[in-house]
Amino acid sequence: MELDAGGRTVRLSSPDKVYFPERGFTKLDVARYYLAVGDGIVRALRERPTTMERFPEGVTGESFFQKRAPKNLPEWTPTARIAFPSGRYADEMCPTEVAAVVWAANLGCLTFHPWPVRRGDTDHPDELRLDLDPQPGTGFADAVAAAHELRAVLDENGLRGWPKTSGGRGLHVFVPIEARWTFAQVRRCAIAAGRELERRMPERVTTAWWKEERGARIFVDYNQTARDRTIASAYSVRPKAHAPVSAPLRWEEIDDVAPRDFDIATMPARYAELGDVHADMTEHAFGLESLLDLAARDEREHGLGDLPYPPDHPKAPGEPTRVQPSRARHRS
């Protein structure tokens, strides 16, 4: 069948293929969902190199991440070349219109993972993304409590964040920034913000990279700001049985919602009523000077330097050992 997507005709093959058996949602339901939130998903993806998380047979089948743009990518969808930590390159799709989103959905793409950069400058992020990840023994309410305090940390450093559900149990807070700093500098700011939050909520928040050290706390996943680490976009469908979506929120409502409130059946009505509650993000671009000063002060006064990178990243200057603490004790 064919769908009209913002004035373009996009072909949808096997529209009745069931993608979410528990709910009975089909490929067509997913495509119609993305049309319903079209301006919002495009705002979140516009001109960003984007990795597709594909489920060709639905959420109960095999899946894979596709970083390189498919060979049959429509000529009206631009691409950008991005560099991985290994030094290798790839050309990724950069959606600029809802037709590109629907076209990807036809390939079984449920979740869109945009880089925090625009295709005009792929080395300087324009978003600081803070991931509040509940660890075992904690849940969404704990992430909400951490998010409120994080909001205060950001405000005190001249920044404003926009919260959204992860589509799971956690919360993401995105801060639009000037595209003047490197990935390493933006990551340094995420660490600084996380450490300040940890100081204020030591029993409830942690920046510990090793799971054995986190306990029942909210983990501020600072490595989501490392190069080639991405976070599901706002409005992305998440690959869980009940078809949840990553829902943009207003600060005043985060205490009164639950992640399961937002799925491909409920979000269109919310969107029709409220529109894209994060639409004004594009009007802002904050500086990171204050968080960089905080990071320098942490290092100077408390000896708090870098934290471990993900295992697939090359060793960074000044990075501490990547040996799991329990193993390090055993070796000594």
Image: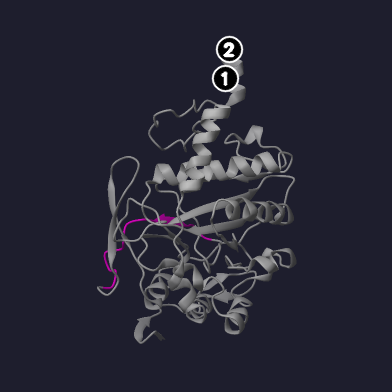
The residue under label 1 is which amino acid type? Ala
* Figure quadrant of the N terminus: bottom left
Q: Which of the pair 155/213 is nearer the observer?
A: 155
Read off the residue under disc 1: 328
Whether pointer 2 and pointer 1 mark residues with C-beta atoms closer than 8 Å, the reply is yes
User: Is residue 69 within the magenta segment?
Assistant: yes
* Figure quadrant of the C terminus: top right
Q: Which of the pair 322/284 is nearer the observer?
A: 284
- Is 200 left, or right, of 36 in this rendering? right
Read off the residue under disc 2: 332
Q: Which of the pair 169/182 is nearer the observer?
A: 182
Q: What stretch is highlighted in magenta?
A: 61-74
Q: Bin the neighbour count of mark 2 within 10 Å (Cα to Cα): few under 14, some 14-19, many 20 and up.
A: few
Which SS class for mark 1? helix
For the rendered model, the colour scheme is one colour
Q: Main secondary structure of the magenta part?
A: loop
The residue under label 2 is which amino acid type? Ser
